[in-house]
Image (cartoon, rainbow, N blue to C red):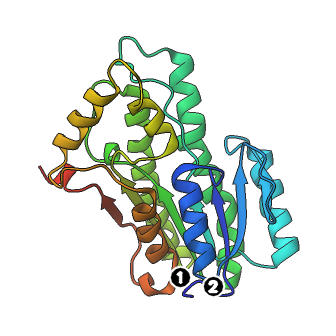
Amino acid sequence: MILANKVAIITGAASGIGKAIAERFRSAGARLVLADLAAMPEPGSHQMDVSSESDWIRLISDVLTECDRIDVLVNAAGISLSNDTIETCTFETLTKTFDVNLCGTFLGCKHVIASMRDQGSGSIVNIGSIFSRVADGKCAAYTASKGGVGMLTKSTALHLAKTAPGVRCNQVSPTFTLTPMTEQWLAEPSQGEVHRRTLEKAHPMGRLGQPWEIAAATLFLASDESRAITGADFVVDGGYTAQ
């Protein structure tokens, strides 16, 4: 129960990694605020667009009114619209990907800081990607957006260390993870099984990630067990980026 009595906002909580993080945080005793573009029939859920600043301002205000504090923010909302190269990627795809993955994370960090500073503590955890560290020629928009999240995390951490002692910002960077979206892609009749074998072979541990494994790393960074850690990037990738 290492998050007992802590209020935690999790974006992208309706499915995939965000949902797994919510389940893990619930078992650790957190009071959950679940945010997603999709409606969720659960207590503490809020429908919002993370790329909308007004939605963020409203969410933070509502949570502070209801809970009087915010201890943890996990920016887990993210999209990957295509595997296009720089030549085939449309500008519309680029801007939409940036709006959600990078701008959404920026807005969450920006608007939660004041309340965390006032209470003297808090943990922000951004969900990045292995593509925060290494590139992929087929994922121009996604790779660029997650690279931005990595630098945003470090910049935010350095700012907080000087201006809001006790408030931290870190990142968890998953590899290809078996979320419903990934499973659907790998289930394609024509090339799905080929993609799966290729991806598994690319990982030294010989397998893809599981959502609960990402949630476990996120839980550690959210808790007081990691209070000396800020500006870090915890890679959960089966050795992918060590090659």
Q: Which mark is residue 165?
A: 1
The reply to whether discs 1 and 2 touch (Cβ–Cβ < 8 Å) is: yes
Q: Left or right: 225 with respect to 37? A: left
Q: How many labels does the image show?
A: 2
**Amino acid type, residue under disc 1 in the picture:** Pro
Q: Which mark is residue 58?
A: none
The residue positioned 52% from the left and 71% from the top of the image is: 160
| Label 1 packing within 10 angstroms: few (<14), some (14-19), many (20+) | some
Can the viewer see residue 121?
Answer: yes
The residue positioned 15% from the left and 54% from the top of the image is: 242
| Label 2 packing within 10 angstroms: few (<14), some (14-19), many (20+) | few
- Please tell me which residue lies in front, 48 or 109: 48
Residue on which disc 2 sits: 120
Residue 119, percent from left and from top: 69, 84
The residue positioned 18% from the left and 50% from the top of the image is: 206
- Please tell me which residue lies in front, 159 or 11: 11
Quadrant position of residue 212: bottom left
Residue 7, percent from left and from top: 70, 76
Residue 166, percent from left and from top: 54, 83
Quadrant position of residue 112: bottom right
